């Protein structure tokens, strides 16, 4: 928040905490401190006009569609390219430019962002941006939004996007629809945001009254468009101040969890098991089959809840959304909440002993069989090759 002293304060300067002092006539970015809260409450400080406007959700003038280009260790997340594919459609419908916003230590992919559909890349390079920090990123992106006034901003519903999106929405007083599974433009040119609601029993369509209209969308939800290395785009070194004072946190070290990384969202083949496997021991067959196929292991919530496999393997509405080339569903009934996470797979093969199981309604190939006989037979055939 940018602030200035009011006439109610008679002193020459006021301490705002964290070593920041404001003098009469000066405007600056206030730190998040109790000193600032108290001064605002006492009427000694006031937000500058532009901030108040933003608070009322009046940032309405701009036209671009923005995608937040999340990167970790200088590698842009795959979801960003998926969002650019969808963003391209939205921008074309609105007849406006599509821009990616990349915060990083050194440019780690502006050309790739253009190749996947961006017309522009707002690039903020600074060694302080090597690792994600909520307050830092929030401040920089809020400043960019206030300067450039996009009409739509979309973030991946990753750990970072889910942390960052709501924080920005609060700062600039706009709405945010989380975990969208569909994005479109309505006849009034507004963003139509679709997401499951009421336990996945209905798909809600949400519109935002304030701008920018903001959403998060899960990895794997939107189809990746093909890359066009010949596309030309504009690279804009964004004019924002990367001020260490705007961050109250310091990343000392990043320690990766020792557990094996489950990368369902980027897997080409997923072998998924459900309650039809009957017990935890039988579930190990799924793991063996997945290993032979070079696949990742997925699971229904029923087996995650039963403790047969950790939650990071869960596919579905409250798990992960996947879009592999092949999804093999073994002993899974195909409840709506499970289907929500895998129905966009390119090819679905389902194995179930019940010929009326719901999973068959979306399967490309259905096999009516006892899973406890089918998987060992398949494993044995694969081992022969
Ligand atoms: C708010 C909410 C969120 C949810 N989120 C998720 C989610 O993210 N992901 C998810 O998966 N679920 C989710 N669920 C739960 C979901 O509704 C189902 O309960 C769950 O998906 C069922 O898992 P399942 O198919 O493994 O088990 P079941 O529904 O019990 O199905 C087992 C299937 O195995 C078949 N079978 C049994 N024995 C054999 C055999 N020997 N050989 C072959 N087939 C056999 C049966 O015919 C049956 O079709 C959610 C529910 C709610 C309310």
Image (cartoon, helix red, strand yellow):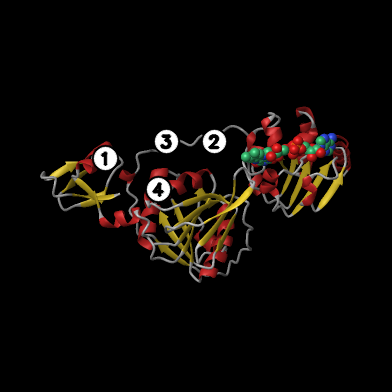
Dot label at residue 252: 3
Dot label at residue 170: 4
Q: Are marks 2 and 3 in contact (CB under 8 Å)?
A: no
The answer for how far apart the CA atoms under marks 1 and 3 are is 28 Å
Q: Are marks 1 and 3 in contact (CB under 8 Å)?
A: no
Residue that appears at 69% across and 46% down: 336
Please say if 380 is above or below 327. above
- Counting every numbered tag in the picture gives 4
Horizontal side of 165 relative to 368 (left or right) equals left
The answer for how far apart the CA atoms under marks 1 and 2 are is 37 Å
- Look at mark 1 in the image and give the residue it sits on: 37
Mark 1 crowdedness (10 Å alpha carbons): few <14, some 14-19, many ≥20: some
Query: Picture coordinates of residue 193 (x, y %)?
Result: 55, 56
Q: Are marks 3 and 4 in contact (CB under 8 Å)?
A: no
Query: Picture coordinates of residue 7 (x, y %)?
Result: 13, 49
Earlier in the chain: of badge 4 and badge 2, it is 4
Report helix, strand or loop for mark 1.
Answer: helix
- Look at mark 2 in the image and give the residue it sits on: 256
Q: Are marks 4 and 1 in contact (CB under 8 Å)?
A: no
């Amino acid at each position: 928040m940018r602030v200035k002293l009011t006439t109610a304060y008679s002193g020459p300067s006021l301490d705002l905490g964290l070593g920041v002092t404001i003098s009469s006539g000066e405007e600056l970015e206030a730190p998040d401190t109790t000193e600032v809260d108290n001064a605002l409450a006492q009427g000694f400080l006031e937000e500058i006009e532009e901030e108040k406007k933003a608070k009322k959700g009046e940032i309405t003038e701009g036209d671009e569609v923005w995608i937040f280009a999340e990167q970790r260790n200088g590698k842009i997340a795959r979801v960003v390219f998926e969002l650019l594919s969808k963003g391209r459609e939205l921008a074309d419908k609105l007849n406006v430019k599509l821009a990616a916003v990349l915060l990083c230590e050194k440019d780690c992919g502006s050309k790739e962002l253009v190749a996947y559909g961006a017309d522009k890349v707002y690039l903020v390079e600074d060694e302080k941006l090597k690792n994600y920090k909520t307050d830092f990123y929030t401040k920089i992106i809020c400043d960019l939004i206030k300067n450039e006034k996009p009409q739509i901003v979309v973030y991946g519903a990753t750990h970072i996007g889910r942390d960052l999106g709501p924080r920005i929405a609060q700062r600039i007083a706009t709405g945010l629809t989380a975990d969208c599974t569909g994005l479109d433009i309505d006849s009034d040119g507004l963003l139509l945001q679709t997401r499951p609601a009421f336990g996945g029993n209905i798909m809600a369509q949400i519109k935002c009254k304030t701008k920018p209209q903001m959403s998060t969308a899960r990895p794997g939800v939107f189809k990746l468009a093909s890359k066009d290395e010949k596309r030309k785009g504009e690279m804009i070194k964004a004019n924002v101040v990367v001020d260490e004072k705007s961050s109250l946190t310091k990343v000392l070290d990043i320690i990766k969890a020792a557990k094996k990384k489950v990368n369902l969202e980027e897997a080409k083949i997923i072998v998924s098991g459900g309650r039809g496997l009957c017990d935890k021991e039988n579930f190990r067959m799924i793991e063996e089959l997945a290993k032979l196929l070079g696949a990742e292991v997925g699971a229904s919530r029923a087996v995650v809840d039963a403790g047969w496999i950790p939650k990071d393997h869960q596919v579905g509405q409250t798990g992960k959304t996947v879009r592999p080339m092949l999804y093999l569903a073994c002993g899974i009934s195909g409840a709506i909440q499970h289907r929500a996470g895998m129905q966009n797979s390119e090819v679905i093969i389902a194995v179930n002993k019940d010929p009326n199981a719901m999973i068959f309604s979306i399967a490309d190939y259905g096999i009516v069989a006892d899973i406890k006989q089918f998987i060992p037979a398949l494993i044995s055939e694969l081992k022969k090759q």
